[in-house]
Image (tube, helix red, strand yellow):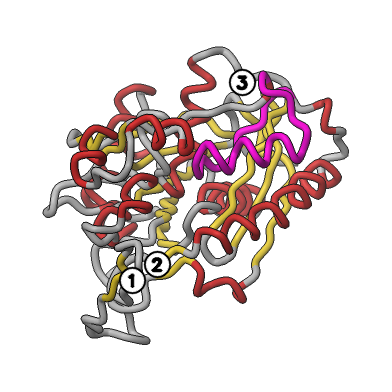
Amino acid sequence: MKKSFIKAISYYLPESIYSNEDLAKDFPEWSIDKISSKLGIKNRHIVSNNTCASDLAFLAAKKLFLENKIEPDSIDFILFCSQSPDYTLPTTACILQDRLSIPTSAGAIDFNQGCSGFIYGLSLAKGLILGGIANNILLLTAETYSKYIHPKDKSNKAIFGDAAAATLISIDGFAEIRNFSLGTDGNGASNLIVKTGAARNPNKSMDINFDELGNPNSSDYLHMNGSEIFNFTLEKVPLLIKDTLNKNNLFQNEINLFIFHQANKYILEFLRKKIQIEEENFFYYLENIGNTVSSTIPIAIKEAKERNLIKGNVLLSGFGVGYSWGGVVLKIS
């Protein structure tokens, strides 16, 4: 029986950095120490006005090819995950196929997924391999949430950074992709949303207003109901971990490393303690990049691998906008 593996990962960060010092200058009521201690984030990489998610994905893919001696001709499918595509149409994956000189015989699709996007991408790639459709899948995750954040929205500016990751999924590699647990609850869609700009509400609403604390609220920018997202996370993620373990016939103490979507340090610490995961078995990587949405998990895998922490069974967990969540176990060879 065919198996699927993660073979290689690279990532790209924009050059411009938005630090906690910059944030404190823009919002003097916030102290640098408070931001660092609560969120666990010191720096975020932010794209320029004329840079799009496809540009980040292109650079991440070029790094992947260069660092791992991968020929574009070997790619037979492209999966592009983003909630900030270049155009309503055409598919950004098609544009990247041409820019990366990947053969025209390769398939290419976009999928609009957020913080669980990497997990969903792995599930799609595994299906393509097991179905005999493709053998070398380029999974690209790229996001430019900074373009959706109002300049006065200090909460979201403190959390999100822009980035892209490129992952090669193949019939061999360092991490076998085992069994998945996936879930969706669209009832929570309005708690993390940009309401205008697509077919439902194509025109800008220009409905900006500010609450008593000076926080902006507008249909034209990213809206996140932090308390509802927090409650959703605390309810669903422990169940997700349990189900992922069950579907892989594993006990929690058989997992060598847990890599969660890097939402922010506060949420991650709360989840780690609630699920009773030892700190040495729980990987953090967001201090200098922030929450990069669908790229947090592949970036964390790359960094954990370079620290020789990837071994045995590794459990991945993504959760967020949608609501959407997913978990999978990697078996390290």
Which residue is labeled 3 in the image?
A: 310
User: Is residue 214 in view?
Assistant: yes
Q: Quadrant of the C terminus?
A: top right
User: Considering the numbered disc 2 on the image, is that residue within a helix, a strand or a loop?
Assistant: strand
Residue 82 placement: quadrant: bottom left
Residue drawn 68% across the image and 30% down it: 314
Residue 245 position (above or below residue 51): above
Tell me residue 253's x, y (percent). Answer: 83, 26
- Mark closer to the chain start, 1 or 2: 1
Which residue is labeled 2 in the image?
A: 223
- Mark closer to the chain start, 2 or 3: 2
Tell me: 153 left or right of 284: left
Tell me residue 5's x, y (percent). Answer: 60, 34
Is residue 283 a member of the stretch shown in magenta? no
Tell me residue 284's x, y (percent). Answer: 53, 28
- Which region of the structure is painted magenta? 256-280
Which residue is labeled 1 in the image?
A: 217
Residue type for callout 1: Asn
Residue drawn 53% across the image and 49% down it: 134
| Label 2 Cα neighbours within 10 Å, binned few <14 / some 14-19 / many ≥20 | many
Residue drawn 74% across the image and 50% down it: 240
Measure how far apart labels 2 and 3 are at the Cα level: 35 Å
